[in-house]
Image (spheres, grey):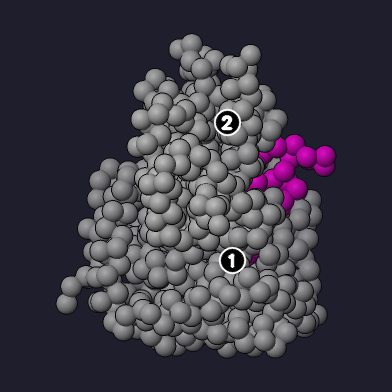
Amino acid sequence: MRNRFTTAALDSGALLFGTAKFPLTRRGVTIGGGSVIPEINFTLPPMDVEQGSMEEVKKIYLEMIDSVCRRAVELHQREIIVEFELLPEMTLNPVWGEEITALLQRSLEEFLDRDGLQSLLRITPVDIRETSKPPRRREGREVDTLFDAFRRCARAGGDMLSIESTGGKEVTDPSIIAGDLRGIIFGAAILGSADMEYLWEQICSIGKETGSIPAGDTACGIGNTAMILADQGYVPKVFATVVRAVTAVRSLVAYEVGAVGPGKDCGYENAILKAITGFPMSLEGKSAACAHFSAIGNIAGAYADLWSNESVQQVKLLSGMAPVVSMEQLIYDCRLFNAAVNKGSAGDLRDLLVDSDALLDPQAFILRPDVVRSLAKAIVAEREDYGRGVRVAWEAVRLMKDAASHGELLISDREGSWLERMELELNGLPATSMQFVSEETERWSDAFDCTQYLVETHA
Amino acid sequence: MDLLQDIALNVQSGYTEKTRKAVEQAVAEGIPANDILHKGLIAGMNVVAERFKTGQMFLPEVLAVAGAMKAGMTIVRPLLEMTNHESLGKIVIGTVRGDMHDIGKNLVAIMLQGAGFDVVDLGTDVRADKFIEAVEREHPDIIGMSALLTTTMVHMKGVIEALEKKNLREKVKVIIGGAPISRNYAQEIRADGYARDAATAVDLVRTLLNSTRATAAV
């Protein structure tokens, strides 16, 4: 059952790192209750993951969890969040994912008993529904296996359940490459939302059954794909910015069917979702440069209740192994966030984080608190996903144009012409969702299987 | 204006219909298909590729241009086939076993096709035996492999070993790419080249094909 948000929970003044309107407490750890907690994620070095290498795989995971926890204790960190992002093989073979979850949780409990280090474990299976082409999203072996992985990992000690789901990607991938905003609205706001509703109802149900927290999703496969391509100069940054705004419509659905946060780290739309839902969010920025580059290294921190490194592989750097390096960086970042809170200067630090990035890139600009608030309001003002997608896209274009004309955002003439192009595209959209879905389903009939989404295409 | 220059300019501007008409006119005037291809269509695409590489064009704009190129190729290709024209090169491309990421691989395929190469896309999660089958069936000049994960990049080596085992390694060049891939890794697994992005992949393919053809000519 989906309960749509019709108002935004937070105004721009209340949008702040470490503080959520609805904090979350589990096993002595409170997220969004006044402090920012580091969320560490790590992955294997180049190696094959198969039955024959599983002992080695487990050994490496044990080394990684042990070393990051040890560094946290040495740096007097009292709370950490660990994310175990299952590799495809570990989701396709859920017993492997279950065994590693249990191993990580055991290690975390040992550090709690011995050193008082409090922790929670987020488990994130891979959306293996993409294994079949076209993806079978609601039936079949991959779907059953995915939910089996969630269930097993939750029972083995996963405190929080997340996923980087990929519904609609069959349409958004080619749309990003083609700079096709109409396709983005269809793929993300219509297909993505329909898939999220189905998927998160299942995940929330597993959460109820196992006692784990249904945390949240990320539109990484859409928003971050556009962001990285924009960073490489393949697509305009203003286009990637509007893509990001539209992804918020789709990621919001998890919270409308029962997820309660913290949203997953690489979803930069989490800023908008925090404003709407009031739930705590994980974000990542400069200290995730080990995984990918971005233009939002500081400003993303303005909303972080958890501060993440995204992921880093177990390789040796001059100081030590990379996950330990990430752990140290995150801890120092969090010390600064939390010192600002304790001195009553959190608002000042938030403003510095915002001001240091917002002028230079449109993708940073739309994370400005006043802009986030406007985008959040645009989304909740509409009930239908189509209306939400169109309205938030319009709002993002309008805000960028306005800011550029007032010297609050630097964009090149080439980028500026894309704002005009997107306005034209938005102006040409059909008035009703039904008509839009019908037209787009026809246009993309070779790209996706509409029976896997169950969107209404006819009146 | 020279008709071939006209074709090149229409391609550069992404004018699909004008390109098609100009190519039809060139054929009607008896201009050799090979000249239409190289001095018209590819000359136009080369300008576009350079603009893209130097940050003067976005990919969606290149795609519009690729549409014009395709319109011209549809007319020229049958004529080239009748004259035993040598293909610019054929590339078999895929994301390796266990890896479902494909946008980077798709971009490489688009750029290669835009540059006039024949591309056979095997998709994602491609096992070594599928690459071998494709090499035996398609006789490509190059195979391109992509991976985004540290745990799937290792399968690239398996494909190269499978090619060696089947005595196919000398017949095909191997290029690799993807977020965790480096030039060092390419050397380590004995690939012939590494490209950091789609634009440089086109350059790499050209360089490898030129060296292969120069060697063959010697």
Disc sitting over residue B175 in the figure: 2
**Helix, strand or loop at disc 1?**
loop
Residue B163 position, x and y percent, is 49, 17
- 10 Å crowding of disc 2: few (<14), some (14-19), many (20+): many
Task: Give the residue at mark 1.
Answer: A236
As shown in the figure, which amino acid type bears the numbered disc 1? Answer: Pro
**Helix, strand or loop at disc 2?**
strand
Residue A61 position, x and y percent, is 60, 38
As shown in the figure, which amino acid type bears the numbered disc 2? Answer: Ile
- Residue at 48% x, 80% y is A423
Residue B193 position, x and y percent, is 63, 30
Q: Mark 2 and mark 1, same subunit? A: no
Please name whichever residue, A300 or B99, is drawn nearer the observer in this view of the structure: B99
**Above or below, comparing residue A335 to residue B47 in the picture:** below
Please name whichever residue, A240 or A94, is drawn nearer the observer in this view of the structure: A240
- Residue A185 visible (yes or no): yes
- Residue at 41% x, 82% y is A427
Query: Residue A325 colored magenta?
Result: yes
- Residue at 77% x, 74% y is A356
Query: Residue A381 colored magenta?
Result: no
- Relative horizontal placement of residue A116, taking residue A319 as reference (left or right): left
Q: Residue A47 lies in what quarter of the image?
A: top right
Chain letter, disc 1 residue: A
Quadrant of the snapshot with the C terminus of chain A: bottom left
Q: Which residues are magenta?
A: A302-327
- Relative horizontal placement of residue A214, taking residue B44 as reference (left or right): left
Quadrant of the snapshot with the N terminus of chain A: bottom left
**Above or below, comparing residue A405 to residue A268 in the picture:** below
